[in-house]
Amino acid sequence: MIVLLGVLVVVIGFATKRNPLLVVGVAGIATGLLGGLSPGKVLAAFGNGFAGSRAVTIFAITLPVIGLLERYGLQEQARNLIARFARLTTGRFLALYLGLRQIGAAVGLTNVFGHAQTVRPLAVPMAEGAAERKFGELPERTREKVRSFSASADNVGLFFGEDVFLAVGSILLITGFVNTTYGTHLEPLQLALWAIPTAVCAFVVHGWRLLRLDRQLERELLTANVPDTAVVEAAK
């Protein structure tokens, strides 16, 4: 059980807001050493894990492409596009993105959307543009809130949508473990069907939170622009 101290390292690291890559790396090293592995075997495990996951190197292609697109005005075009839809508020746009992300993940298109390729260059500028169209220039605190809700829409959509897809790794892992350990015959289709109500509930709950964001922004920004009555009276 002592190897579970690696989990404690992760919890403490994230709770103290340390660098995620550093936290996970230290937790992996601690777990390997506590499990009786030599430093060489721990390093070999990291190397095998990196080499065995080809998706790890996708950033080498994605980031330069996104950088070039942003350099030539991708975010500006996203803001101009959202400005054409007067009724599309920040909350409504993010709820729409949540639905698209969840549907895409449910049919196996987990890499079509994402933080690097969609949230940062497209979703965030469009969400901010919708807010700026109504409230004008956003304070930095409000801008960070919009960005965090944009990231949450992607996270929730992917997390609860991908389990509806039959061939996702988590479904295959669960069926393999249950069938091998308990001697049952659990089909991936059964788990995928049971994941649909969960996905619907997640969309309803988080979609409501995203729609409520419009009221929060209105309350924060419009209230901030209202002059303090006491100050006005004192000035008179």
Image: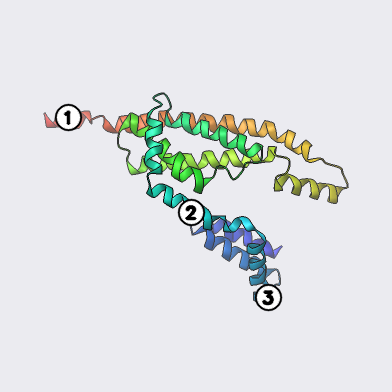
| Three-letter amino acid code at the position of disc 2 | Leu
The picture places residue 182, in percent across and down from the top left corner, at 86, 48
What is the quadrant of the C terminus in the image?
top left
Instruction: Identify the residue position indicated by label 2 in the image.
Output: 63
The mark lying in front, picked from 3 and 1, is: 3
Give the Cα separation between the discs numbered 2 and 1.
Answer: 51 Å
The picture places residue 176, in percent across and down from the top left corner, at 80, 49
Numbered disc 2: secondary structure: helix
Q: Residue at x 34, y 34 (%)?
A: 132
Instruction: Give whichever of discs 2 and 1 has the lower sequence position.
Output: 2
Residue 236's place in the image compared with 164, above or below, is above
Give the Cα separation between the discs numbered 3 and 1.
Answer: 71 Å
Give the Cα separation between the discs numbered 3 and 2.
Answer: 35 Å
The picture places residue 127, in percent across and down from the top left corner, at 42, 36
Instruction: Identify the residue position indicated by label 3 in the image.
Output: 38
User: In the rendered image, which quarter is residue 27 located in?
Assistant: bottom right
Residue 163's place in the image compared with 43, above or below, is above
Instruction: Identify the residue position indicated by label 1 in the image.
Output: 232
Would residue 33 be visible to someone looking at this image?
A: no
- How busy is the neighbourhood of tag 3: few (under 14 within 10 Å), some, or many (20 plus)? few
The mark lying in front, picked from 2 and 1, is: 2
What is the quadrant of the N terminus in the image?
bottom right
| Three-letter amino acid code at the position of disc 3 | Ser
Residue 185's place in the image compared with 36, above or below, is above
Q: Residue furthest right?
A: 183
Instruction: Give whichever of discs 3 and 2 has the lower sequence position.
Output: 3
Q: How is the image coloured?
A: rainbow
